[in-house]
Amino acid sequence: MTNPTPARILATTCLVIGLMTTALSAQAAGYAIEVLVFENLYPDDSETFDPDAGVPDMMGTTEYSPAALGLAGVAQSLRQSANYRVLAHKAWVQPENRSTPTTVFGSEGGGTLEGTVQVERRRYLHVSVDLLFQDAQLESVRVKEDRRMRSEELHYLDHPKIGVLTIARPL
């Protein structure tokens, strides 16, 4: 029986470390994403926003699937308030390596909402929101924002007319 050479020991060690890294990365399957979009029925008139809303790019979107909604209590409070109207409350499971946006539609309380939400792992976790809301008076409001976020923290994207709450929980 021959003694293993240093090169063979190094190659075996690299192979074992590579297999362990692959197994660990397979465990980080992705995120459970939740988004709650609501309308402010009495916006602050001192804030202004661009009336030429434009249209979100809906190309390359994917279907979402319902998941356990952790913001259900917040959504219920907003529904009971005379100051807000819930437009959409969506949740989905997203693989960590997916970078295509998820389509968000809603018309829970009047008006129509459409657009995309994209959660992406770059150096940090990022959320990109591109939503267009048209109220009953046919006034359009667009929220287009990209923000760095931390997982398991609730994030609020502010606009005078609509608000967006989002959270990403690692699986």
Image (cartoon, grey):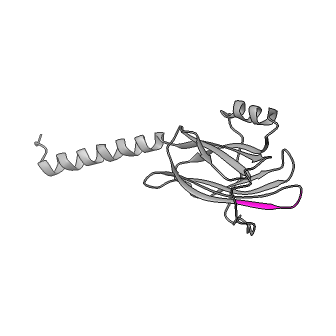
User: Residue, x 71% and y 32% (percent of image)?
Assistant: 72
Q: Is residue 139 magenta?
A: yes
Q: Is residue 120 left or right of residue 161?
A: left
Which sits in the foreground, 169 or 86?
86
Dividing the picture into quadrants, the one containing residue 50 is bottom right
Quick check: 96 above or below 142? above
The location of residue 130, given as percent across then percent down, is: 67, 59
The location of residue 132, given as percent across then percent down, is: 75, 59
Dividing the picture into quadrants, the one containing residue 3 is top left
Residue extending furthest front?
46
Which quadrant of the figure contains the N terminus?
A: top left
User: Residue, x 30% and y 43% (percent of image)?
Assistant: 16
The location of residue 93, given as percent across then percent down, is: 62, 43
User: Residue, x 81% and y 32% (percent of image)?
Assistant: 80
Which sits in the foreground, 42 or 87?
42
Q: Is residue 9 left or right of residue 162?
A: left
Q: Which residues are magenta?
A: 137-142
Q: Is residue 112 left or right of residue 128?
A: right
The location of residue 97, given as percent across then percent down, is: 52, 53
Quick check: 153 above or below 146? above
User: Residue, x 29% and y 47% (percent of image)?
Assistant: 15
